[in-house]
Amino acid sequence: MLNLLITRKLPDPVLDKAREVFDVTVRDNTAPLSRDELIQSLSAYDVVLPTLGDAYRADIFDAVPEKRTKLLANFGVGYNHIDAVAAWAAGIEVTNTPGAVTDATADIALTLMLMTCRRAGEGERLVRSGQWDGWHPTQLLGLHMSGKTLGVVGMGRIGQAIAQRAHFGFGMAVKFYNRSAKKMPFPAEQVAELTDLAAQVDVMVIAVPGGAETHHLIDAAVLNAMQPHAHLVNIARGDVVNEADLIDALTQSRIAGVGLDVYEFEPKVPQALIDMENVTLLPHLGTAALEVRTAMGLMAVDNAIAFAKGQPLPNRV
């Protein structure tokens, strides 16, 4: 029986399925693997099921001359914490869990859109503080989202799910920026330049994959192109946004508000963002629903089982 390391506790149905096929070790720690743990895992386990923050970089693979691990079955669709090219060079396959995260992540995007546009976080803090004196006509006036223009940066599965919710649910016009040309099954206009998209929309949502190609994609040039009443939402990866540029844009009131589920140096959140009332902050809740996390885990385990049985990997990256 092959042995499997699961680097963070997963829902019980996932662990039960894994134990049918593998000798399973579940790490009793919610933090990412340390460098020593990363190195040890490659020499001690046939398969590792890692997740966000478990930084399998080239130097980690280089530090283990004889690697026992032959598969990193990532829990999550994003795998920018794994150097997949270095893994392949080391004889290690990498899989992920696409599809399972789409709807839940899109739902969080809409949550953040509404929260930042309607100043919901600010209002909730006001009530909890005991300083709310009652309703009046000009209190906490925000942006009415219905009928406005949404800009989607990255029109993959998640981007399309966000756009569909916004268009059919809120009557929003949809514009998008994508590396390749795409035709949508709903009304949507592709814009060739990201700064042009930023200038044309009321709400802009980031839904691109993480990695070197999208690092600091949203920088001062993009933020400066946005309209002063516009809002930015990020449910992708934190380092897609240059947080220093974002803080500057907010401080200078160049944009109206921001909704964030991810952060450039996660879990560190800049105090400047915490202190701003027009910033909505969530603790990476994108897929935080029991049935979704279970589906993700089962998909990751299915990849591991296929490997153990010598079958094609369902979700090879």
Image (cartoon, grey):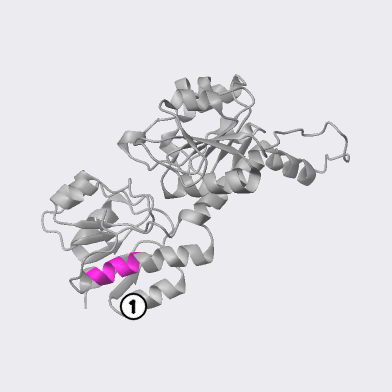
Residue ID at (47%, 44%): 159
Where's residue 281, x and y in %?
Answer: 58, 42
Q: Quadrant of residue 71?
A: bottom left
Q: Quadrant of residue 66?
A: bottom left
Q: Secondary structure at mark 1?
A: helix
Q: Assign the magenta stretch its main secondary structure.
A: helix
Q: What amino acid is labelled 1 in the image?
A: Arg
Q: Is residue 120 left or right of residue 32?
A: right
Where's residue 29, x and y in %?
Answer: 42, 60
Q: Residues within 10 Å of mark 1 (few under 14, many from 20)?
A: some
Q: Nearer the viewer, residue 47 or 235?
A: 235
- Read off the magenta span: 300-306
Quadrant in which the N terminus appears: bottom left
**In this view, which residue lies farthest toward the bottom?**
20
Q: Is residue 70 left or right of residue 235?
A: left
Q: Nearer the viewer, residue 66 or 230?
A: 230
Q: Is residue 253 left or right of residue 298?
A: right
Residue ID at (29%, 66%): 303
Q: Quadrant of residue 144?
A: top right
Q: Is residue 200 left or right of residue 68?
A: right
Question: Is there any visible trace of residue 9 in the rendered image?
Answer: no
Q: Nearer the viewer, residue 171 or 48?
A: 171
Question: Is there any visible trace of residue 131 in the rendered image?
Answer: yes
Where's residue 95, x and y in %?
Answer: 28, 58
How many numbered callouts? 1
Residue ID at (29%, 60%): 315
Where's residue 55, x and y in %?
Answer: 31, 48
Q: Is residue 304 magenta?
A: yes
Q: Which residue is mark 1?
A: 19
Q: Is residue 23 magenta?
A: no
